Each structure stands twice: as C-alpha cells, then as structure tokens.
Amino acid sequence: MPSDSRLSGGIRTFDWTALPRGWRFELLGQLCSIRRGASPRPAGDPLYFGGQIPWFKIGDATKERGRWLRNTEDTVNEAGAACSVRVPAGSLIVSNSGVSLGFAVLAAVEGCIHDGWLLLYDFVGADRDYLYYCINYFTPRIRGMADGTTQPNLNTGIAARLIIPLPPLPEQRAIADILEALDDRADLNRRTNETLESIARAIFKSWFVDFDPVRARAEGRQPVGMDAETAVLFPASMTGGDSETPTGWRRGKIGDVASSTASPVDPRTLDPETPYIGLEHMPRGRVVLDEWGQAGQVMSGKARFQTTDVLFGKLRPYFRKVGIAPVSGVCSTDVLAVVPKSDTWLPFVLMHLSSDDLIERANACSTGTKMPRVRWGDIARFEIAVPPERVAAAYCKMVSPMLRNAVSSVLESRTLAALRDALLPKLLSGELRIRDAEKMVEDHV
C-alpha cells in the first residue's frame, strides 16, 4: 500500500496493496459520518416500546439474511424514538458488537436503531451500496481487530479508521450494480418462497385443521377455491364428541404417517464437503431449509438424512426450526430427521410438524433441565385427524409443485451467493474489471 499520511493510523482489512490506475485508498471516516445508535432504558418498558415505529434489532437482520431489513418484531413510540436514533429508509447500518459484529444491512423502512448499531450517512465521494459490500466483505477481519474480549466492540473511532479501496464513483456504482443483481435475484427467490409457503400453510389449515371443505359440504355449499372433483373427496359431515373428525377419517398419530430412525455416522468417515445441517443453519418458520455447512467443519456426532426428509430441531426453544432438507447429508444429533411413509404424505407431515399445536406438545414433553429436548417417541404420539390417502394425495398434488419450486430456488440462491462471494474480492481489488464481471453474471440473472 503506498505511503500516505492521510492513512496514518488506518486499519487495513484486506490482502492486496496495489490498485488500478485512478483508484485510491481512503479512510471510512473520510467517506461518511458515523454515529452510534441509542437505546431507551429499560428495554421493553411500555413507556418507550410498543408504538408504531420499527425498532431494528440485530436478530431481525440476521433472520431475513438479505440486503434489506424490512420487518421488525418490536416497535417503539415517539418517546422511545426520542431516546434512540431515528434512521430514514435506505440507511446503511452496521452491527457494532457481539457475534454479528461488522454485519451491514440496509433499512428498507424508517425506524430506530439501538446502541448495538452504527449508522453511516452523509456520504462524500462514496456510493452507499459499494460501502455496504466492502463492509460485509471485511466483516471477518473487523471481528478480529475490534475492541473487547468477551464482547468485541466496533466503536465509531475504529470504524472511521477502516481503510477502503475506492475506485471512481461511477465504477463504485457499477460494482455495486453487479453484486446487487445477484443479491436481488436471491432476495426475489426468498420472498417468492415465503409466499408459496404461506399458501401451502393456508390450504393445510383449511383442509386439515378447520375442515372448511367438510363444513361447506355439510351446509350444502361448494367449498371455496376448490373444484368439484376435489370437493367430492371430502365427506359432508363430522363425527361428534370432544375431538370432531370428518366422517370416514380416523383419529391417529403423526407416527402413523412418518418415522424417524436415527442413522448415526462417524464424522471421521465422511467426505469433509458433505452437507451438514445443525440448529444454527435452521431458520424459524421456513418450510424449506436454505442454509447448510460442511461436515468437515464439525467433529461432533452426526446422523444421516436424505433429500426431502423433514428436519426438526429437538431442543427447546428451537422446536419451530422445521423444514425440508433440499440436499442429502448429515445433521446434528440435536436435529430429528423425520421420514414420511411415502411422498404422498410429505406435505401433510411437514405442515403438522411445524404447526402451533405440535410445538406446544413438544414444549410439554421436553425433558431435561439444562437443555430440554424432545424425543421422537413423544412427537410420534401427537394426535391428528388422519384423512384417507386420496385426500392426502390431493393436497400433495396441489402443494408439491410449490415445494419443488422452493427447493429449486434455494439451490439457485446458493449458486448466486457463491458467485457473488467469488466476484466480491476481485471487484474490490480491481483484479476483475466491470465488463468481464457483467459477462459472468449474465447467465445467472
């Protein structure tokens, strides 16, 4: 890196020392203003919390795992906002502490940030999105040099001293456009999958929880959104008693239509690149899992699973981590691999395992003080209304294309992310120029 008094005291977070003609190195603090967020105290106090203003938490950003932070679990009111830092839509914010330190995200809506965030604003000669990609690429090294021991911290002083490789502004924007095209396609896949999953859940609830088609036929009505051929598969009456069931269906258990036979494997016998899924890879509320690691990175006990097995987190409070495996591989012993008795029953089993009622049973049956967990035997005894196979087949026929599309989207998004990660350092160092990168991206978006 050329000697430059402007960079005195700067922190380099990359390996290259030379840049293309017309590029320069610059301190982040010379490219933008940096401000730390603030938090109303105490946390959760109704004097400050529960209003209409989004309250950005690190967990909200890591849950969405995209470039944009759109949804928040919590809100603050005007009094809370006055004790915090309000950020406009489009703001670039960076986590400044904890395990997510150095993670950057863009706020899709106006909201407030707590003191675990840094706000970057008033950019001078720097493109916001280019800086977003720089910071996220530098994240591992930022974590390695941040202040603190048990709780590393990226304060405003350290952030301002980060050295940024800076091409001319038009080239910054062109680099960001290339990377955004990949991320936007992955983001579209993610949001499409969420819509498909919501549709599949809504149909399941209507057919197998609320029994809407049965009740409609009992009242002499055509079931809403259902053709006549499918409607006749449902009876026109319910049995009486405490557990109402459609006539001709039976009260059974989830274990009647699925099993879980653990197949332990010695990790030393595995190809290190074998897909590995642990609880840390399983997001809540996704019916198709979209993240996994490699078996060579973990030496603890593992169990085998196959593509389209349903994985279920068996430790409390992770029972809502349930989803289809899009690949074959091995999973943590803290994860149950559940196998439907046939492909026909896959969507039915998946939706039951991720239902509120089954989660309540898992909570009630879990044992242990330090790390409560549930056994498959307890889950298998969960009572359900078991329909004739032809009804399960009709649901499978309707929903399986959605699930297949979701799996395909997950695999495509992994490819897009791998391409982005390969291009990122080459673009930031100037090793790969814009035109060549655009050609590499054209086939994927």
Image (cartoon, rainbow, N blue to C red):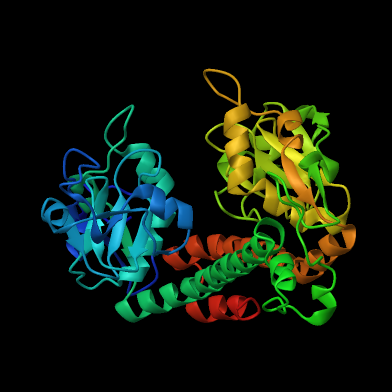
Q: Quadrant of residue 294?
A: top right
For the point 82% across and 74% down, the residue is 230
Q: Nearer the viewer, residue 86 or 242?
A: 242
Q: Residue 78: where, in percent of width, then height?
A: 14, 59
Task: Evaluate whether residue 410 shows in this view.
Answer: yes
Q: Residue 224: where, in percent of width, then height?
A: 67, 77
Classify residue 400 as left or right of residue 242.
right
For the point 71% across and 51% down, the residue is 244
Classify residue 79 as left or right of residue 203.
left
Classify residue 28 as left or right of residue 18.
left
Q: Quadrant of residue 177?
A: bottom left
| Count of numbered circles on the image | 0
Q: Residue 253: where, in percent of width, then height?
A: 78, 41
Position of the N terminus by quadrant: bottom left
Task: Evaluate whether residue 305 shows in this view.
Answer: no
Question: As displayed, is residue 435 above or below residue 377?
Answer: below
For the point 82% across and 69% down, the residue is 397
Question: As displayed, is residue 339 above or below residue 17?
Answer: above
Q: Quadrant of residue 43?
A: top left
